[in-house]
Structure formats: structure tokens, C-alpha cells
Amino acid sequence: MPRVVAGNFSPTIDTPPFYTQSMDLDCPPTLGRLLKRVGDVRKEATGDGSETPVHQVLELGDTNMEPPRSIPFILSFNNLTYSVKVSRKMNLPSVLNRGRRRHHLGPATAAEPVVGESMFTTTKTLLNDISGEARDGEILAVLGASGSGKSTLIDALANRIAKGSLKGTITLNGEVLESRMLKVISAYVMQDDLLFPMLTVEETLMFAAEFRLPTSLSKSKKKMRVQALIDQLGLRNAAKTVIGDEGHRGVSGGERRRVSIGIDIIHDPIILFMDEPTSGLDSTSAFMVVKVLQRIAQTGSIVIMSVHQPSYRILGLLDRLIFLSRGQTVYSGPPMHLPSFFAEFGHPIPENENRTEFALDLIRELEGSPGGTKSLVEFNKSWQNMKHTPNTEPDRHGLSLKEAISASISKGKLVSGATNNDASPNSMVPTFANPLWIEMAVLSKRSVTNSRRMPELFGIRLVQFWLLGSF
Ligand SMILES: Nc1ncnc2c1ncn2[C@@H]1O[C@H](COP(=O)(O)OP(=O)(O)OP(=O)(O)O)[C@@H](O)[C@H]1O
């Protein structure tokens, strides 16, 4: 049974954001100066000089709490197309035919390679003209059967696809995102949890804070960030529990997944990418993970995730959906438009039926039919043209992307290495928060702490070192 947080609520600051009070937009301050001002404003707000983190505490039962207003961010992607070369399956007659054609012994047929193809390779389109947008405060979910292209789309948006092979545009607030900038303001949460079994949840997150947050951020601030994150992740009751493994009892699967998320979002990213965060979890744990993601979104982040088959409750937490079939969009829109979409397509969703299950079943059925999903792809295009409401762009206070990021940080968001006082724009986005020797020291300390608590592993390591030292 998952534990629900009875956490404290960290108050947010009512004072108007100081970028509107004093930030000179013609000359944006460095992130370091902004962070300092964050401290000053928080001190003013608390009155007693203590600096209170603005991150909110997760209270799963509390749905009335007003999320803090954030700086608007919109990630738009247009006409994303991604193809790869795959080796062609060869059979002798086709090879002979090809040879004959090359020597003008017969007419070319449809099987002749087209431009960009060769005798041995063919082009496979993994993403075909995908467009959409994701906004801060919202969760965009990519759905589809296995092999439909969900992971590929998430990878494309997270800039994890080789440069040049992806066609189309990806912009944040209308500006093309440099890969360095994206790396700093985003996080990609892996499906696999690589955690140290003998560290507690709190220690795991503290090591992540020491590794990823800059040394210029004091230890007490890092501790505050970890405590706020524990509450946000709904892990207060499990904070002192070890992660565990097959041989040691530890946290539950859902808690473990939330710890993994916590490690990746320790720097409070503006964009969070996740490939199947709920896979392998029971429905309650899966719901709690997505609830945590909703809370993260509400602190001013864009959350983009893939999900196989969300339950009815999870569907209620998602703001936008993209259904894929063989790399093509078959539905794009909010969950509440699913019934009208499928009704207009001629396949109304029966009452009391899970909408996503119905949609996925119908897509699978069409995929197996002679015409494939072409009719649904075409219908979606015309439906988008018909129904698509003009972009209701939120008020961005006239900020450029960099100014919006700075302002977002000033409202409590952290960015790794953001305390650099250098005024050049590039200094805003250092790739590494800490020098290599600090990273090595943190990693070694983590490994030693974990090994010391596993005497059997510690013994094996000791023998290994002794043997290696003897030769
Ligand atoms: N580098 C590649 N070369 C060739 N085919 C690829 C490559 N990467 C992915 N694919 C194929 O592209 C299709 C989409 O893969 P992808 O992993 O995005 O699907 P998915 O919807 O995430 O599936 P799952 O739910 O099983 O994870 C699959 O058919 C996969 O085999």
C-alpha cells in the first residue's frame, strides 16, 4: 500500500516576482545575480532571515491548492520526420531482376530502389510529419501500440537523435533551442532505475544534489532542495528507508520510480522527458507517479511522457495526447475531445468504455486492415484543420527565451551551474555544474557508503583490490 504524504506545506512568496520589480529587460542579469536576488526576496518574505524553498509539497488528497503562476513556456514541434536506413531483405530472384534491369534487359518495376536507397538498404520512416505543442503546467502524453514510434518521438524532442537525420522544427517560445541550452533546462528520465541499494531515499537524493547542483550553492540550500523534493515526490514516509534489492528489503516499486525521477529533476528542469514512467507498476503506483508528474508540471515545467495504456484515473491527469500509429499521428488533442473525434470518424466510443483502450483497439484493428490507418490519419488532419482553435498564446511579459528562463529561475527554479557570475550569454548554460574532481569525489563517497553497508560486497572489493595490488 503506498504511503501518502502528511507533509508540511512550504509557503510560496506573495511578493511580485522581482524581475517585474527591478529587472532591466534591456540588460538581463546573469543567473548568478538572479539566484542571489531569489535569496534576498525569500529572506524578506520569511522575515526571520531563513530562506524558505518555494517548491511545493505534494499532498495527494489536496486538489484545491492553487499552483504558483509560472513564466509561460511553449514547446512547439512541426512536421517532424525521421527516417533511417535499414538493410534490405534480399532474395535471389529480386537480385537477378535488379541485375537484369541494370543491363536494360527489362522494364523497371515498383520494386526498383528510389533515390536515397540502394540495392542493400531501404529507408524506414519512423516519424512521419508529426506536429504538436506542449505547455508548462501540462502533461503531454504520447500513446500508441508497441513499435508505433513513442520513444522515437520523445528522443526527437529531447534532441537525442543524430543531427541532420531529423527533419522539421522544434522551438521553445518561438526560438530554436540550442542543444546546450536544452541540456541544462531539461531532464530525460530513463526507464531503468540504476540506484544504490544500501542508500536511503534521502541519501540518494542528497548525493544527486551534490553531484548536479553547483558547489556555489551552499550545503544547507542543497539539503532544503532535497527535503522539498522528498515532499514533492510523496516520499516523506520512505525518506529514511533504503532503496533495497533482491537481497535487502527496501522501498516499493512505485517509490523507487519516484526516487529515479527525483534524481533527474534535482535541478528542477523546465522540460521533463520521460519514456514510459509507469511501465511495470501496479495501477495505484502508476497513478501516484503521474500525480507527481502533474505536480512537477504545475511548478512551471513542461512534462512530456510516453505511456502504453493509461488507466481512466491517469487519463484524467493528462492534458494533451498524441496517438501514434506506425510513426504517424492518428489523434492529437485533449482527452476530453476523444469521444467527439471518434464519433465524427464513425466509431463512437461506447459509454463506460475506457477511451484510450477503445482508441488503441480501433487503431490496431485498422492497422490490420487492407487500407491501414490511412483513413484515420487523413481524418485527423481534416479534424485538426476544422477544430483547431487558434493558438491562444499566453502573455509572456514580452520576454525573450533567455529572459523567460532567467525569470523562471528567479521564481524558484534551479538550473545546474546557474550561479556563474560571468555576464556573457553562454555562461548561462554551462554544461557541467561541477568540476570533474568534485564529481569523482561525490561518486566515490556514494560507492563507498553503499559498499560499507554490504559487508559481502565490501569483502569481495577488498579481495579484488588486494589481488590487483599483488600483481
Ligand atoms: N535505429 C533504428 N533502426 C531501425 N528501426 C528502428 C530504429 N529505432 C527504432 N526503430 C523501429 O522504429 C519503430 C518505433 O520504435 P519505438 O521504440 O519508437 O516504438 P515505441 O512505440 O516506443 O515501442 P515500445 O512501446 O515497444 O517501446 C519500431 O518498429 C522500431 O523497431
Image (cartoon, rainbow, N blue to C red):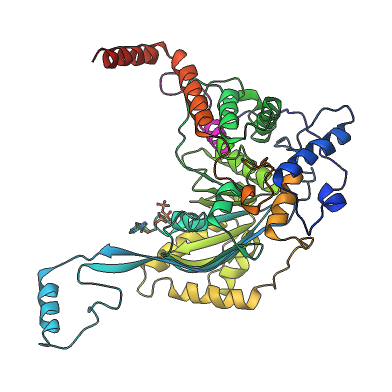
Q: Is residue 258 magenta?
A: yes
Image position of 423 (left or right of 382): right
Q: Quadrant of residue 36?
A: top right
* Ligand 1 lies in quarter: bottom left
Split into 4 quadrants, where in the image is the C terminus? top left
**Residue 412 showing in the rendered view:** no
User: Residue drawn 84% across and 40% down?
Assistant: 13
Q: Position of residue 83 (x, y in %)?
A: 38, 66
Most foreground residue, 376 or 36: 36
In the image, residue 306 sits, relative to residue 99, either above or below, namely above
Q: Residue at 73% across / 35% down in the picture?
A: 57
209 sits left or right of 129 in the view: right
Q: Position of residue 268 (x, y in %)?
A: 64, 42
Quick one: quadrant of the N terminus?
top right
Choose between 222 and 379: the one closer to the eye: 222
Residue 416 image point, x, y percent: 61, 41
266 w.r.t. 345: above or below = above
Question: In the current view of this chain or complex, which residue is farthest to the right?
Answer: 47
Question: Is residue 99 a member of the stretch shown in magenta?
Answer: no
Can residue 421 be seen here? The reply is: yes
Region of the chain picked out in magenta, as a range = 245-261
Return the residue nearer the eye: 53 or 444.
444
Instruction: Please tell me which residue is depicted at 10% across the width and 82% down the height of the picture.
Output: 100
Q: Position of residue 171 (x, y in %)?
A: 60, 63
Marks counted in the figure total 0
